[in-house]
Amino acid sequence: MSSISLPGGTWTLGDLTVTRFGYGAMQLAGPWVMGPPADHDGALAVLREAVELGITHIDTADAYGPRVTNQLIREALHPYPASLHIVTKVGATRDQQGGWPPARDPQSLRRAVHENLETLGLETLDLVNLRLGNAEGPQPGSLTEAFQTLVELQQQGLIRHLGVSNATTGQVTQAQAIAPIVCVQNMYNLAFRHDDELIDTLAGQGIAYVPFFPLGGFSPLQSTALDKVAARLGTTPMSVALAWLLQRSPNILLIPGTSSTAHLRENIAGAGLTLSDDDLAELDKIGH
């Protein structure tokens, strides 16, 4: 296997040092994140390749499948290397139609944490994100009861660190008033820049920001603009999108997902692209 260097260096989540380039396991489940993968052995190979390439940050959730991605992670990587940190999330479940109904009452959250521990084969979860909002995005509302439930589980030794996902800026502030958080995981990319101010605030506080859907929400015109930059640089739109995120702020951690080892290596190489000031100026027009 040829050597490959991970772009972006590392970041510290509380007392956990992780590679800024991580891996998101959601795509390992079947269509619409339901059921088993079409290629079971291929899914295991991608996970093993990620760790062999030096990735120390894997993002998952017991709702993926459900239970599928966690079981794959355990089968592929358990017992886990000491350097590997698995991040999971709770607060939503799955229905038979493939929806993501909220499950943020205390009983559901406790059950979800124990199910994540069981399927991953762990005694303590490194980092648990509380998923808020719905499939449409963040929604206003109090997270106090739900977040306090996770704090209680943290005090019991079942969770090491806490974060929030799909959250409004106000909910991030609410969570921080209850207990420390080490990351925020929201939709964000070149075309969807609602969290620009939040990212800068978190960077000043030493808190990670983990964007999902690096190519989600682009209009046709925005996609065309990105395609032109990628073509000029001789690379792919995904490579440009990932490289831009790494250069946007040092507290941004990437978790692109794929079910292909070749695509995994392509994403890593692409994210290492250095964008010039002129490139960045042109790309910034996409989101404004």
Image (cartoon, rainbow, N blue to C red):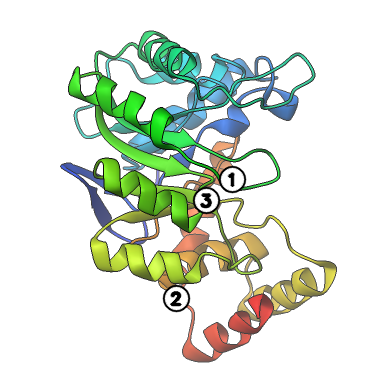
Report the quarter where the N terminus lies.
top left
Residue type beneath disc 3: Asn
User: Disc 2 to disc 1, how far (Cα)?
Assistant: 19 Å
User: Disc 1 to disc 3, how far (Cα)?
Assistant: 23 Å
* Label disc, if present, on residue 186 of the rendered structure: 3
Q: Give the residue furthest to the left.
A: 15
Residue type beneath disc 2: Thr
Near-viewer residue (288 or 47): 288
Q: Secondary structure at mark 2?
A: loop
Report the label total. 3
Q: Is residue 137 above or below residue 8?
A: above
| Dot 1 or dot 3, earlier in sequence | 3
Q: Give the residue furthest to the right.
A: 220
Q: Is residue 268 above or below residue 156?
A: below
Q: Secondary structure at mark 1?
A: helix
Local crowd size for mark 1, using a 10 Å CA cut-off: few (<14), some (14–19), many (≥20): few
| Dot 2 or dot 1, earlier in sequence | 1
Res 4 seen here = no
* Label disc, if present, on residue 274 of the rendered structure: 2
Q: Secondary structure at mark 3?
A: strand
User: Disc 2 to disc 3, how far (Cα)?
Assistant: 24 Å
Near-viewer residue (150 or 58): 150
Q: Which residue is mark 1?
A: 263
Answer with left or right where residue 174 lies relative to residue 286: left
Res 110 seen here = yes
Residue 156 placed where, x, y %? 19, 17
Local crowd size for mark 3, using a 10 Å CA cut-off: few (<14), some (14–19), many (≥20): many
Local crowd size for mark 2, using a 10 Å CA cut-off: few (<14), some (14–19), many (≥20): some
Is disc 2 in contact with disc 3, using a CB cutoff of under 8 Å?
no
